[in-house]
Image (cartoon, rainbow, N blue to C red):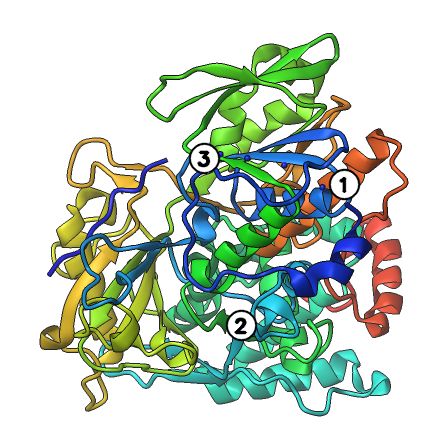
Amino acid sequence: MTTEHTQEPQEQTGHTRRRFLAAAGGAVGAVGVTALMPVQSAAAAPSGPRVAVLGGGVSGLSAAHELAERGYAVTVYEYYDVLGGKARSMDVPGTGGGGRKPLPGEHGFRFFPGFYRNLPDVMRRIPFPGNANGVHGNLRSGTEALFARAGGRPDLHFPLRRATTPPAPGDLTPSWIRDQLLAALDLGTRLPAHEVAYFADRLLVHLTSCDARREDEWEKTSWWDFIRAGDMSAEYQTVLGIGQTRNLVATRAEVASTRTVGRVIMEALLLWGLLGRGMDGDADIDRVLNAPTSEAWIAPWETYLRSLGVEFVTRTQVREVLYAGGRVVGVRVSAPDGSQERTVTADHYISALPVEHARRTWGPALRAADPQLARCDALETDWMVGIQFYLRTPTPVVHGHINCLDSPWSVTGIGQAQFWDVRDFPADYGDGSAHDCLSAIVSEWDKPGILYGKTARECTKEEIVAETWAQLKDGLNDAGKTTLTDADRLGWFMDPAVTGLGGPDPQNREPLLIHPTGTLYNRPSARTAVPNFFLVGDYVRTDVDLATMEGANESARRAVNALLDADHSDAERCEIWELYRPPEMEPLKRIDEVRYRLGLPNTFDLG
């Protein structure tokens, strides 16, 4: 059984946040995936200014949420017939039977690190039956990450529980941090001692660098060069170079910005996560949902937004944002096939499209009004595509995520059914024969695979599936154990955004923003020079500085605050959580700021 689905490209309008938080208990959250055709909302039509949100992904829904709770009349225009963007899950056609739902497919598995704080806040405000904390109560913690090695090499297991007793303020010194890094790397990586020591010292350099040095020197330096990977062992290059960049954020270590990798992945995700600093309450490092994304999060979110009067206009493609007289005066839209072209108008406009689609809608006049729009043309994207494998037997592998370090296609994955404790997989999905879903992601599309010697872009869809399965087995079936067998695999589903595979011009409608050096300088602010036009999305400049759902939500908060300022509104502004900054490091950063201005290296930078 091979299961595929061709996704088709999405129709509908606010009240103060406090007022609706008080009434949230009366809202009914959806448990299953709801139909997304236009319906008459039961809520009274909001009487505030009208806002057109162009895009129904995480950033667009986040903006709609904040505005609707503040009394604005919001209409979201979405290309697909479902909401959620890359975060959504989707039914695999023709796979349900005996009263069960179709098998769940997705763009790629979802991941909610503990350092996310903006997105969890909005999840707490989405009602869900039986959950005091709303949709946030559907999060489950992974306890371990598996770095799977091929060729019989021992796998690397990293426990992901936060420290039960975080370091006291006086303990968090550079020498203490260095000792903790050395211990963790020595225990988990089997790297040569001198390479472990060098890497720990490089992290200390970044940790104590001032903001100016990070935004200049380290933004212009690749992670590969920063950790001197070219001079180190192949193991060092794989584990600390490629494994922390291409496999996680689809950016090659040779070009990935040190500022982004060091600040978000090494510090916020790993170091502060393990130490329990700057986290979402008592969250662990790695969290996932307890059911398919649309069931556990997106559908209840849509239900709540409809209760606030938000309208959704689906199956609508944004063609051009129209600019005249110093303002946006409308948006030209159509059906996905180009028919039913029309112009929609509002008082304010929020572009919530991914950057590769948004910049096509900005005409010369609009670009001339704000030069930062043109700089978005320099932002880069790459492919990061998901494949789900449906298995006959429960196959959790590890209680967390899998990173196949030696995979030429940078394959990662997770066994999902183990976290879906509110679901019985064979009783709820498919025809009853599938007991698990191993959700994998291919992040490297330009290197030859192990079966056909072709890059992923050169392969047909079936060849990609076979190759990805082979690379998963290569990492998981070794050291005397067989985790995956061909006989256990029932079927598969691949992200339908990828088309034309095996042909001369394969396309991907949903690539991922990547972070090569210099990306920071081309990321726009949420506020534009056009007073009624705002930008949201994971490409917008935010503190989290990474293409994530957290960045998408943070950008929406910044855009809504800018809109409230432009509207001279007295509504409460959105709270914004920034990445954790340990106070113990601030004196060292101030010293580094002086050294940076004098042209001197960081105190710990010994070359």
Locate residue 497: give its quadrant: top left
Q: Residue at x 54, y 73 (%)?
A: 139
Disc 3, SS? loop
Q: Nearer the viewer, mark 2 or mark 1?
A: 1
Residue 88: x %, y % from top left: 43, 53
Q: Which label's residue is closer to the chain start, 2 or 3?
A: 2
Residue 19: x %, y % from top left: 80, 54
**Residue position marked by numbered label 1 in the rendering:** 71
Disc 2, SS? helix
**Residue position marked by numbered label 2 in the rendering:** 138
Residue 538: x %, y % from top left: 58, 45
Q: Residue at x 66, y 62 (%)?
A: 26
**Type of residue at label 2?**
Asn
Rounded to the nearest angstrom, the CA distance separating label 2 from label 1 is 28 Å
What is the quadrant of the N terminus in the image?
A: bottom left
Examine the rendering and report whether any part of residue 558 can be seen.
yes
**Residue position marked by numbered label 3 in the rendering:** 314
Rounded to the nearest angstrom, the CA distance separating label 2 from label 3 is 27 Å
Q: Which label's residue is closer to the chain start, 2 or 1?
A: 1
**Type of residue at label 3?**
Thr
In the image, residue 224 above or below residue 153: above
**Type of residue at label 1?**
Gly
Indicate left or right for 218 with 503 as reference: right
